[in-house]
C-alpha cells in the first residue's frame, strides 16, 4: 500500500488549500484516515481524523477552519483548509489504518505567509 499526498503550496494568510491523499495497491477496508502535521522544531501532531463510520475529529486549533472528508469514508481522503494562518505552516502527512496497520504518505509542504 502506498499513500500519495498532494495539494500543498504557498498561500497568504486567510487563504485556502485543499490536500488530497490517495492510497494505491491492494488493500481491504480502511479503518481510519487522518492528517498530521509537523512544523519547524515541533513534534508531529494529529490535525484531523475520520473513521470508517464517517466520524470526524479535529485538534482545537483548526476547528471551524479545516474539514476532513472522504466519499463514504473510502479512499481518497481530503483536508480542506480555510482561513490559513502562519502557524499552520508545516509539512502535512496523511495516514491510513488498514487492517490494523498504519500507512503513511510522504509529506506535502504547506507554507502560509503573513
Image (cartoon, rainbow, N blue to C red):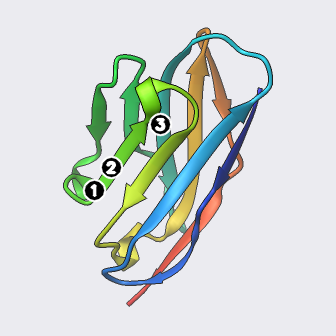
Q: Find the residue positioned furthest to the front.
A: 71
Count of numbered tags: 3
Q: Is residue 70 above or below residue 68?
A: above
Q: Residues within 10 Å of mark 3 (few under 14, many from 20)?
A: many
Where is residue 44 drawn, in percent x and y? 51, 48
Q: Is residue 20 above or below residue 23?
A: below
98 on left or right of 32: right
30 on left or right of 32: right
Where is residue 5 drawn, in percent x and y? 65, 50
In the rendered image, the quadrant that contains the C terminus is bottom left
- Residue identifier under label 3: 34
Q: Is residue 73 above or below residue 4?
A: above
Where is residue 38 drawn, in percent x and y? 53, 56
Comes first in the chain, label 2 or label 3: 3
- Residue identifier under label 1: 62
Q: Residues within 10 Å of mark 1 (few under 14, many from 20)?
A: some
* Label 2 residue SS: strand
Give me the residue at 28% from left, 72% from top.
Answer: 83
Disc 2/disc 3 C-alpha distance (Å): 11 Å
- Residue identifier under label 2: 67
Comes first in the chain, label 3 or label 1: 3
Give me the residue at 61% from left, 9% from top.
Answer: 99
| Whether residue 43 is visible | no
* Label 3 residue SS: strand
Amino acid at each position: 500500500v502506498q499513500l500519495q499526498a498532494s495539494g500543498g503550496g504557498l498561500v497568504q494568510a486567510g487563504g485556502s488549500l485543499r490536500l488530497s491523499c490517495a492510497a494505491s495497491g491492494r488493500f481491504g477496508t480502511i479503518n481510519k484516515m487522518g492528517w498530521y502535521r509537523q512544523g519547524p522544531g515541533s513534534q508531529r501532531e494529529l490535525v484531523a481524523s475520520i473513521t470508517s463510520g464517517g466520524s470526524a475529529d479535529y485538534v482545537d486549533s483548526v476547528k471551524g477552519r479545516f474539514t476532513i472528508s472522504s466519499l463514504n469514508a473510502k479512499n481518497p481522503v481530503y483536508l480542506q483548509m480555510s482561513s490559513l494562518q502562519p502557524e499552520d505552516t508545516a509539512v502535512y502527512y496523511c495516514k491510513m489504518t488498514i487492517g490494523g496497520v498504519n500507512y503513511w504518505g510522504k509529506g506535502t509542504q504547506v507554507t502560509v505567509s503573513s
